[in-house]
Image (cartoon, grey):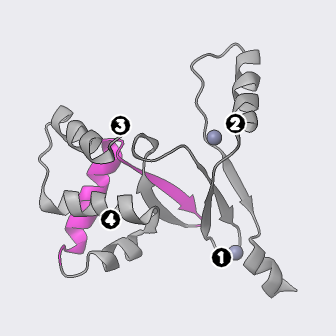
Amino acid sequence: MFDAMTRYHQTLRDRQLSNTSTRRLIFETLLESGDLSMNELTAKLKGNVNRASIYRSIQLFEAAGIVRRLNAGWKYRLELSEAYSSHHHHLTCINCHRVFSFQEDNETAKAITKLAEKSGFEDVTHQLEIRGLCADCQRKNK
Ligand SMILES: [Zn+2]
Ligand SMILES: [Zn+2]
């Protein structure tokens, strides 16, 4: 069975990083919440951890491939990397910069792989970047 927590401990061990309570709290919070901005993450951890050590832990998590950064306008959001969550993509609104997650169907995933294979690639993985105007912003603009 896939267990994000086990993989997290394994990654820390492999990299000889200790599992401090700050790191564990951040990991658990991202695991529970999906994607968060730095402010939202800080707010959720309020009182428990200071901002500087949250920043340090996030940097370390990014370097270790535990966390990835989703750019949304000039801001960014944080989420656990695909090793810790199921394969999915994001739609970013060009107006309000909110990020929406979605999963493509199997057909689409296969079509992407096929395209890459036509160019002689194997062991194909992919990321998609999709931008547009979200439903809320469309309504407000009318
Ligand atoms: Zn929007
Ligand atoms: Zn995909």
Circles 4 and 2, Cβ within 8 Å, touching? The answer is no
Query: Which of disc 2 and disc 4 is earlier in sequence?
Result: 4
Q: Residue sitting at 77 percent across and 69 percent down?
A: 133
Mark 3 or mark 2, whichever is nearer to me: 3
Circles 3 and 4, Cβ within 8 Å, touching? The answer is no
Residue 43 lies, in percent from the top left, at: 33, 80
Mark 1 or mark 2, whichever is nearer to me: 2
Work out whether 1 lies above or below 38.
Answer: above
Residue annotated with mark 3: 1
Query: Which of disc 2 and disc 1 is earlier in sequence?
Result: 1
Asked which quadrant contains residue 49, the reply is: bottom left
Asked which quadrant contains residue 99, the reply is: bottom right
Residue 12 lies, in percent from the top left, at: 20, 41
Residue 21 lies, in percent from the top left, at: 14, 61
Mark 4 or mark 2, whichever is nearer to me: 2
Residues shaded magenta:
48-73
Query: Which of disc 4 and disc 1 is earlier in sequence?
Result: 4
Q: Alpha-carbon distance for marks 1 and 3?
A: 38 Å
Q: Secondary structure at mark 2?
A: helix
